[in-house]
């Protein structure tokens, strides 16, 4: 008797289809296990040379490409030596392998120079940690179009790497510097840029930022400039203090004689050591220092800006989070005839800046709204004048301070505009604003914007307000 289903078919299961399904499942599991078992492009850590810093120079008709490498194996157990992480000397005792070093290769093109690095390096270059690109002055003046094209097309190089320019050779800068508080030179320089940007002293520029700015409407950009400065360093731990021969010292003022009756002498430390200060070594080590900005037009370096001119640009382009402005102190004698001013200058911390830019083909206007906090009250009698609510004269004094801040910021911006107009480099990005606000007017001047920017009238208006005085007890009720 056959058991029939509802359709009248036999109830016997279809073992053929089940077997095929099982075979497919086994094949899928086998393939997955093969893929999980290993990576087709893996590199062992001891086969890599990790690049932290890249430096580009131009010498005659050839490029020089330098890399700051860090060893991935065989690192010394002691502390890092000067240049560790960024190049230069490394290692502690003689004969110990260096923790980091710099290798330089030359070539007719940058790609050829990078290829020639293999003549000196026995491991595969690993670019994932290259966060700093240093451009020498000669290479920057020659032109960086080839550099930007190579870096942005290279699949392993990071376009988020920070770009800086140095006076002189970039390879010397990378190889000779002493690492400060950072673990590596690349970390040291990038952190200096990041912190200085908050105070409107510079602006962090990545490779993709520089490429976009030079190919934009203004074809101009401002890049941080670094230099090497000699700074005194304390001696290494365990270094004996300098001695002064010929001096005798006893705890009681009497001679200290031994069993033989001979008087023993003890060397006394130098006065600086007695006062608890370190003596600098005879040869100070070089450290990195932010020194201004490099102005690029098209793809070439055309000039430098000092720190004051750079901050004038940053007030508009990259407003600071906290920048100190030193302004003349208002006459304290007018507030209290019995006392005169205690200081010539007073510090105001600018916490908030709101720029508004309007540009036409004939003129431009920059309006800045500045809000600051009085950080120093050296020229006020704090508790008698600013410490009382609605103190007589406090409102007038803070208004004078706000006007002084406005004048100082306005002077810095106008000075930067004058310097960059003489260069014909619109690092303020006014061309971009004109393109966005008046497209028709931009099309009429885009081919000659450099000449237009040189003579463009720019009006600068700054309105400042002191929102607080820094006094924690009964701050004055100031309405400006």
Image (spheres, grey):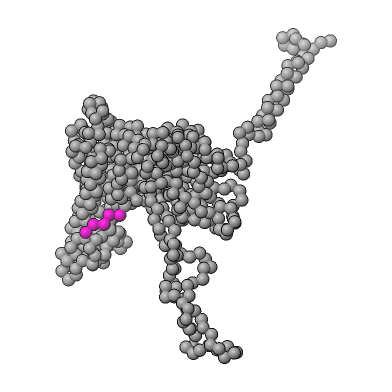
25 up-or-down from 414: above or below = above
Q: Nearer the viewer, residue 351 or 230?
A: 230
Q: Residue furthest front?
A: 60
The image quadrant that residue 135 belongs to is: top left
Image location (x, y in percent) of residue 69: 52, 46
Please report the bounds of the magenta region as a residue range: 324-328
Q: Please tell me how many numbered marks the rendered image carries.
A: 0
The reply, left or right, for residue 183 in relation to residue 325 is: right
The image quadrant that residue 476 belongs to is: bottom left
Whether residue 406 is visible to the viewer of this picture, yes or no, is no
The reply, left or right, for residue 212 in relation to residue 425 is: right
403 up-or-down from 361: above or below = below
Indicate whether residue 138 is drawn in magenta: no
Image location (x, y in percent) of residue 15: 77, 17
Image location (x, y in percent) of residue 425: 27, 38
| Secondary structure mostly taken by the magenta-highlighted segment of the chain | strand
Q: Nearer the viewer, residue 396 or 105?
A: 105
Residue at point 42% right, 75% down?
Answer: 271
Residue at point 22% right, 63% down?
Answer: 344
Whether residue 223 is visible to the viewer of this picture, yes or no, is yes
Q: Nearer the viewer, residue 22 or 318?
A: 318
């Amino acid at each position: 008797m056959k058991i029939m289903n509802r359709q009248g078919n036999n109830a016997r299961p279809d073992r053929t289809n089940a077997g095929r399904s099982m075979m497919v499942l086994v094949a899928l599991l086998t393939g997955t296990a093969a893929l999980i078992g290993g990576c087709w492009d893996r590199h062992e850590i001891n086969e890599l040379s990790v690049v932290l810093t890249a430096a580009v120079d131009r010498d005659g008709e050839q490029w020089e490409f330098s890399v700051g490498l860090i060893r991935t194996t065989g690192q010394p157990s002691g502390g890092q030596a000067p240049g560790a992480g960024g190049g230069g000397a490394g290692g502690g005792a003689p004969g110990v392998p260096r923790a980091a070093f710099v290798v330089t290769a030359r070539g007719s093109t940058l790609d050829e120079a990078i290829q020639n690095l293999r003549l000196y390096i026995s491991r595969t270059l690993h670019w994932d940690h290259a966060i700093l690109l240093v451009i020498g002055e000669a290479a920057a003046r020659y032109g960086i179009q080839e550099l930007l094209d190579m870096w942005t097309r290279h699949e392993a190089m990071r376009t988020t790497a920070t770009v800086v320019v140095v006076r002189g050779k970039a390879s010397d800068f990378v190889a000779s510097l002493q690492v400060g508080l950072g673990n590596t030179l690349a970390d040291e320089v990038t952190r200096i840029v990041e912190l200085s940007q908050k105070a409107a002293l510079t602006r962090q520029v990545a490779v993709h930022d520089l490429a976009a700015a030079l190919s934009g409407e203004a074809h101009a950009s401002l890049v941080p400039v670094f230099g090497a400065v000699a700074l005194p360093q304390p001696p290494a731990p365990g270094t004996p203090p300098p001695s002064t021969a010929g001096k005798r010292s006893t705890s009681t003022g009497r001679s200290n004689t031994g069993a033989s009756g001979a008087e023993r002498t003890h060397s006394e430390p130098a006065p600086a050591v007695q006062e608890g200060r370190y003596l600098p070594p005879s040869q100070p080590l070089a450290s990195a220092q932010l020194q201004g900005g490099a102005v690029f037009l098209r793809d070439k370096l055309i000039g430098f800006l000092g720190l004051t001119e750079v901050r004038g640009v940053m007030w508009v382009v990259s407003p600071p989070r906290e920048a100190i402005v030193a302004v003349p102190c208002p006459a304290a004698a007018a507030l209290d005839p019995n006392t005169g001013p205690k200081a010539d200058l007073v510090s105001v911390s600018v916490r908030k800046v709101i720029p508004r830019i309007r540009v036409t083909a004939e003129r431009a206007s920059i309006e800045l709204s500045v809000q600051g906090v009085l950080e120093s009250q050296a020229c006020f009698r704090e508790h008698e004048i600013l410490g009382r609510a609605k103190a007589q004269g406090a409102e007038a004094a803070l208004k004078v301070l706000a006007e002084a801040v406005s004048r100082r910021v306005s002077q810095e911006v106008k000075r930067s505009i004058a310097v960059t107009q003489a260069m014909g480099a619109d690092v303020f990005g006014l061309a971009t604003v004109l393109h966005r606000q008046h497209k028709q007017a931009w099309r009429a001047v885009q081919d000659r914007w450099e000449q237009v920017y040189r003579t463009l009238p720019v009006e600068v208006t700054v309105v400042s307000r002191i929102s607080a005085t820094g006094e924690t007890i009964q701050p004055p009720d100031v309405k400006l």
